[in-house]
């Protein structure tokens, strides 16, 4: 890949509302480095997994109304990261577009498939055995995936085929997203300058 195309696959997004203040930078052609602080320990852990297994470098700082609950910070983090990925992808020329992963984690198995089509849609077939992981409501993970898919422009299918431990379930979802995203945003050397669609645009 040329230095010009590499330079175009990095983006920074900032979002400030009355509920949250978030800044994120992503480098699609990274090595999986991360520097993440959201104020929510478990969410930090998941975003670190996302970076490490996608090879997308992620720097993120979030301050939110955690004294109320974790909802706004979780959702807005998904929004900002999704927007940063979309901006880094630009016109989506040369990407492989599709990605898939089947991720085992002890007793759990999760399947993730995505299309970086710029047509956002989430299918979420994930059930948790607990309402909370630490202080975090497990229902918030769907909110994060919905926000990320919407703003990154992904058709995203996440399905836990089986599992019992809620920590393993959600971690396999993030690792599956990471592995599928790594495939989808990778440049295809055979079509490095072409948009992967007969429409000519994504």
Image (cartoon, rainbow, N blue to C red):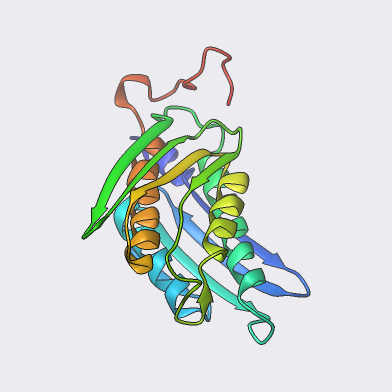
45 relative position to 22: left or right? left
* 143 versus 157 height, above or below: below
The residue depicted at 46 percent of the width and 66 percent of the height is: 59
- How many numbered tags mark residues here? 0
* Front-lying residue, 160 or 12: 160
**Residue 78 in the image, given as x and y percentages of width and height:** 57, 59
156 relative position to 29: left or right? right
174 relative position to 70: left or right? left
**Quadrant that contains the C terminus:** top right
The residue depicted at 46 percent of the width and 45 percent of the height is: 9
The residue depicted at 66 percent of the width and 87 percent of the height is: 67
**Residue 200 in the image, given as x and y percentages of width and height:** 56, 16
**Quadrant that contains the N terminus:** top left
- Where is residue 120, by image quadrant? top right
103 relative position to 199: left or right? left
* 158 versus 59 height, above or below: above
* Front-lying residue, 46 or 133: 133
Instruction: Report whether residue 31 is seen.
Output: no
Outermost residue, right direction? 18
**Residue 140 in the image, given as x and y percentages of width and height:** 57, 65
Outermost residue, bottom direction? 67
**Residue 124 in the image, given as x and y percentages of width and height:** 51, 46
* 97 versus 59 height, above or below: above
Outermost residue, top direction? 198
């Amino acid at each position: 890949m040329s230095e010009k195309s590499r330079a175009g696959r990095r983006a920074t997004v900032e979002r400030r509302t009355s509920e949250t203040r978030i800044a994120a930078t992503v480098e699609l052609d990274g090595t999986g480095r991360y520097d993440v602080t959201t104020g929510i320990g478990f969410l930090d852990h998941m975003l670190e997994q996302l970076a490490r297994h996608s090879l997308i470098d992620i720097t993120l700082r979030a301050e939110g109304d955690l004294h109320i609950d974790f909802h706004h910070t979780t959702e807005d983090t998904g929004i900002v990261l999704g927007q940063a990925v979309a901006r880094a992808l630009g016109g989506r020329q040369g990407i492989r577009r599709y990605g898939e992963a089947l991720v085992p984690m002890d007793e759990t198995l999760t399947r993730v498939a995505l299309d970086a089509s710029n047509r956002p849609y989430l299918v979420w077939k994930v059930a948790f055995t607990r309402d909370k992981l630490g202080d975090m409501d497990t229902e918030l993970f769907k909110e994060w995936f919905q926000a990320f898919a919407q703003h990154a422009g992904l058709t995203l299918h996440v399905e836990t085929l089986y599992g019992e431990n809620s920590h393993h379930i959600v971690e396999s979802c993030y690792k599956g997203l990471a592995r599928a995203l790594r495939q989808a945003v990778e440049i295809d050397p055979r079509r490095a300058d072409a948009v992967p669609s007969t429409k000519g645009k994504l």
